[in-house]
Image (spheres, helix red, strand yellow):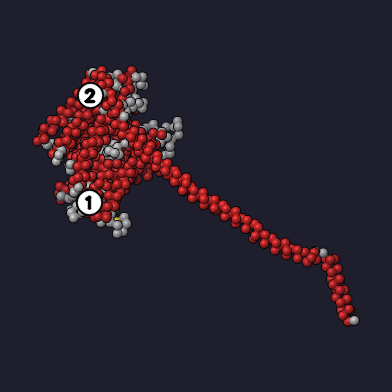
Amino acid sequence: MVIAAEQGGALLAGTLALPLAAVLLILVFGGRRIAAGDRPTSRPGLVAATAAVLSLLLSVGCVLIYWKAQNRYFAPELHISGGEWIPGFGPTLGLMLDRLSAVLLLLVDGIGLMVIVYSLGYMRDERDQSRFYAALLFFIAMMKLLVLADNYLLLFAGWEGVGFASYLLIGYHFERWKAAQAATQAFLVNRIADVGFLLGILALFEVYGTLNFRGIHADGIPRPAVIGIASALLFGALGKSAQIPFHVWLPDAMEGPTPVSALIHSATMVCAGVYLIARSSTIFDAAPEIGRGMAILGVATALFAATVALVENDIKRVLAYSTISQIGFMFLALGVGAYNVAIFHLFTHAFFKSLLFLGAGSVIHALHGNQNLKEMGGLRRKMPVTFATMTIAAAALAGVPGLAGFFSKDQVLDAALLAPGGRLLFAAGLFTSLLTAIYSGRLIFLVFFGERARRSGVAPAHGSPPLMLAPMLILSGGCIAAGYFLPIHWSQWPVLLTTGIAALLGIWVAYRYYIAQPEARTALDIRFAPLAKLLRNRWYVDAIYEEQLVDRFVMRMAHGATVVDNTIIDGSVNGFAWSTRQMSRLSRWIDRYLIDGLVQFTSHGLRFLASPARALQSGAVQTYAFLFIAGLLAALGYFIVRTR
């Protein structure tokens, strides 16, 4: 049963239209860029916060209507459908709310509101706030379009809108070369992966004759077609979710403002690929070999990113690699067919990762822009709220028993263990969980313990305003409670016990090497110097990309394009210009010496022949009288001669 539009469709359309209307309002009335020395206006931020609150209320209303109807009528979805985009093409302008999109809708609106409120304090000194809040609201609107779309084409529209908005947000400080480069890199890498998604959409329409989710099935479809479609969709998802080999854009995206990192890297953009795979579960269930490859790729990405996070010194990059790693866990769950588990981990991850980014922003704000972990320390007394909330979030990320990440990560590993041949996947995932706990503890110990900040000469820290602390307190509650939204399977106690021990062991290892015996860590770095160098250079993946892909492939392609441009394109243009110039010269010679010469010859000849007559036409009366008398006398003389 589909709920009619009048039973909730208006709310569904309104929750999407409201942030777009706020974008127009901010751009039109938000004010121009503030000149240096003037006090920045807070109007754009207030408009954005108001729109976010109202949008969240509408989304909650939609979910409540859907939940009530589901309990009463077992309605599978709340749906509103418009006309076809192109008559006869098939896809309609339809919005759909079901269990999957409801989770993402509330996360996007909830995390979006927290980020906007946080930004009121974090961005209060920025002079171009209209552009920031307009891009932020546009991002939220496009993400909501992505999760509410009832067909692949409309989903792709939201997908591309999110990519464009992320380009604007990452490159907000476009006057900085690194920010502009990071925005361009994120945009280009995602566009490369989006080619696969677009090919998958075309193949879907070719095979099924429709792009609506309800019309997609695997019955009677040739396996090569299903495998090809699944591969294309996976290719697109890997780019958006920053999985190997498309992960390189995400750490560099940290050049954007910290609130942007909290929004993009928690439950929204980078999780869009997870949503796409879960939404296309029918297709992937029919292509188990693609699923196995996805699981292997996911756990490999999780392990790789966790090892790099162990040695990163930029606080935001640690969290960026942590995001890549945790999404790798989600892809592991997707690959073994545990779609609900993947979404559950996405749900819990949204709370602790967004809180960690906001906490990192609070630390950076307190240290006047410093992001180096080596120059931090001893901040727990100066920033007690930030310390408490970030500790809760880091413990949830590490998988400490009782917190959100513990339950969702446990279910991921349990699903991997139960899959065919899943012992190796489980072992790799468990080891990654241990590394996660180590780098989570390392982050907290380096920032809030010790006295590094005082010894390094960093400017004294100052506290964060209440507008920044309030969202962090709210999200910390989610880090505690979010793990209890699904029933706890106590029958899986061996896995629960194992993952809990791994989390506590990892935190103990971090405490030993960063607090209790730092000299032991120094000795460890010396003993395993080659490995430490490998990790600090991110397994040389970035270098290989830059040397092999950029310097060799891209630069050679650019050199080839330059040669083609100089020899063929420019040669053709220059040759055409030369021939045109020569034809012009010939035409000018013909015009000057033939056409103009003939005209001038005729003119001069006529003038010469007309000269005697012109001499007689002087206009003088005496001349006319003389000529008249002379002519008369000549005529008389002629007649006299003839008569004789």
The percent coordinates of residue 453 (x first, y second) are 32, 20
72 or 189, nearer to the observer: 189
Q: Quick check: 186 above or below 396?
A: below
Residue at 25% across, 46% down: 231
Horizontal side, residue 182 vs residue 306: left or right: right
Question: Residue 510's mark?
Answer: 2
Residue at 31% across, 25% down: 373
Quick check: can you spot residue 476?
Answer: no
Identity of the residue furthest to the bottom in this view: 643
Quick check: can you spot residue 547?
Answer: yes
* On-image quarter of the C terminus: bottom right
Q: What residue is pinned by disc 1?
A: 224
Res. 123 image quadrant: top left
Q: Amino acid at mark 2?
A: Ala
Instruction: Say which element carries label 2.
Output: helix
Horizontal side, residue 600 vs residue 248: left or right: right
Disc nearest the viewer among 1 and 2: 1
The percent coordinates of residue 628 (x first, y second) are 84, 71
Res. 290 image quadrant: top left
- Measured in 3D between alpha carbons, the distance from the residue under mark 1 to the one under mark 2, in whole angstroms, is 48 Å
Identity of the residue furthest to the left in this view: 491
